[in-house]
Amino acid sequence: MSRISTKPNLFDRPTVTLLKKGKMKFKNKNKTLLILDLDETLIHGREKPLEKKEDFKVFHFFIYKRPFLKEFLNSVKENFLVAVWSSGSDDYVDEIVKHIFPKNYPLEFVWGRSRCVYRSKRYNEDFGRHTEDYSNPYFYVKPIKKLKKHGFYKNRVLLVDDSPEKCIDNYGNAIYPKEYLGENEDNELLFLLEYLSKLKNIENVREIEKRGWKSGIKINKNSR
């Protein structure tokens, strides 16, 4: 979706890097930073409504929350530092966050498209990913190296995003949930909660193989 922004990111709260005896003190040294994508990960937004009633509207988009979103957000804040990073426009991201996160929810930062890097799809192919659609020869990337100056250590960062190409520089940090398109029957966030519980105390998440992350996970579908 095209979401053009001209407004500053009102929720941008970067962590100030602390220095102690000449060394950087990382905020996530003892607690992993969990960065959440929005569209097709936590919510689904579209210009034309589905047959069911939308949960809310932002600008001209009909927004549908992913099932178990409330439970997911309430749970992850207990074991992780939580942040949002989306390639949606900054003003769109701000509005979505206002609607889906409880008031005073402890978010480390909220970043939108202005914090992403615009990259050619040809670069994507260099990493062995074949691109069929050349109608748009560019895509957005979320380089976590940006986080260091804000006080976050990359070995304790998890990036949850349904789009692997946006994590092309950070495969070792990425978890790819199934794309959400507004379905009523969807348990992905329950699977993700169970998987994250296994990673919360890992000192270097980049060393963990995350492909096929749902394999062997059992969930309680009646958690709601």
Image: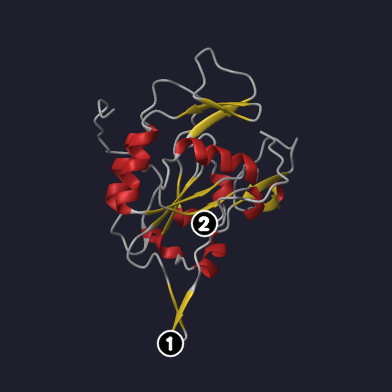
Position of the C terminus, as image quadrant, is top left
Tell me the tag on residue 170. 2
Residue at image position (27%, 38%) is: 217
Which amino acid, mark 1? Lys
Q: Nearer the viewer, residue 77 or 184?
A: 77
Q: Residues within 10 Å of mark 2 (few under 14, many from 20)?
A: many
Residue at image position (48%, 68%) is: 151
Find residue 220 and report its horizontal and vertical position in percent. 24, 30
Position of the N terminus, as image quadrant, is top right
Q: Which colouring convention does the figure follow?
A: secondary structure
Which amino acid, mark 2? Asn
Task: Find disc 1 in the rendering and name its residue.
Answer: 21
Residue at image position (25%, 25%) is: 222
Residue at image position (53%, 29%) is: 44
Q: Which residue lies furthest to the front in this view?
A: 103
Q: In this view, does 37 lie to the left or right of 197?
A: right
- Quadrant in the rendering for residue 4: top right
Find residue 82 and report its horizontal and vertical position in percent. 42, 52
